[in-house]
Amino acid sequence: MHRRWHSRGRRIACIDGKLNAMSRRFALTVGVVTLIVTVISVAFFNDNDNAVTAPSTTTIVAETTTTSTLPTTTSTTSTTTTTSTTTTTTTLPTPIPPPSDTNAAEPVIELGTISIPAIDIEMGLHEGIRLTTLDLGPGHWPGTAMPGAQGNVVVAGHRVSKHQVFLHINELVVGDEIIYETDAGRFIYAVTDMQVIEPSDLWIIDQTPAYTTTLFACHPPGSTAQRYAVFATLAQ
């Protein structure tokens, strides 16, 4: 009886020991679980705190202003001015050659009058330079300019024969007047030069754009060896 009881007591003691050991394990397990839960909770709340208390990040988008500058275009209009020059060509008179027969007859054509106050001359002016015409008075060389016209008015006259119209032509001086009166008007020329020339000096009948007149006669008086020429320019 005694051993049997004792044996049951030992089993009870063993059961108690086992229960105590299980209790300790259970407590340890609970502690471990509690610790784990606590750690997880702390981590969780720390994460939430981090989420809540995390500094806010503000994204600032800089406003960029783009200024587009168009190139400045300067339009230049070129104006071309064309100057038209009109050239007026004047056809000058063409004198006829000296007559081969100075004694031949020719029509009597009176053009007007010629006056030279300095040597007291006033006579009719005829067209032609043959002797038959010069016997009537001073003669205009055909083909030279008419009085008052552009060119050279050439007039010849006797010195000692017939009316001796140009007897004192050599007495004219610079500035003396030679006056023509025709249907075209009254034209006054002023003497500019005097010269003794040769019979072959036909340049005295040349025409130029100027308004001039040339008088000539035999020289010396009573001789045909030379000629005496007077040159004048249109004054008015």
Image: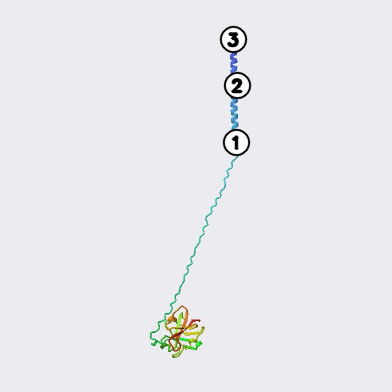
Q: How many residues crowd mark 1 within 10 Å: few (<14), some (14–19), many (20+)?
A: few
Image quadrant assignment for residue 87: bottom left
Of marks 1 and 3, the one in the foreground: 1
Residue 3 numbered mark, or none: 3
> Residue 24 bears which disc, if any?
2
Name the residue rendered at 60%, 11% in the picture: 6
- Could you tell me which secondary element the residue under label 3 belongs to? helix
Taking depth in this image into account, of 56 and 87 the one nearest to the observer is: 87
In 3D space, how far apart are the residues under numbered discs 1 and 3 (Cα atoms)? 69 Å
Residue at (60, 17) in percent of width and height: 17
Q: Amino acid at mark 1?
A: Asn
Q: Please state which of the two labelled residues, at mark 2 or mark 3, is closer to the viewer.
A: 2
Left/right of residue 187 with respect to residue 47 in the rendered view: left
Residues packed near mark 3 inside 10 Å, few (<14), some (14 to 19) or many (20 plus):
few
Residue under numbered circle 1:
50
Q: Residue furthest top?
A: 1
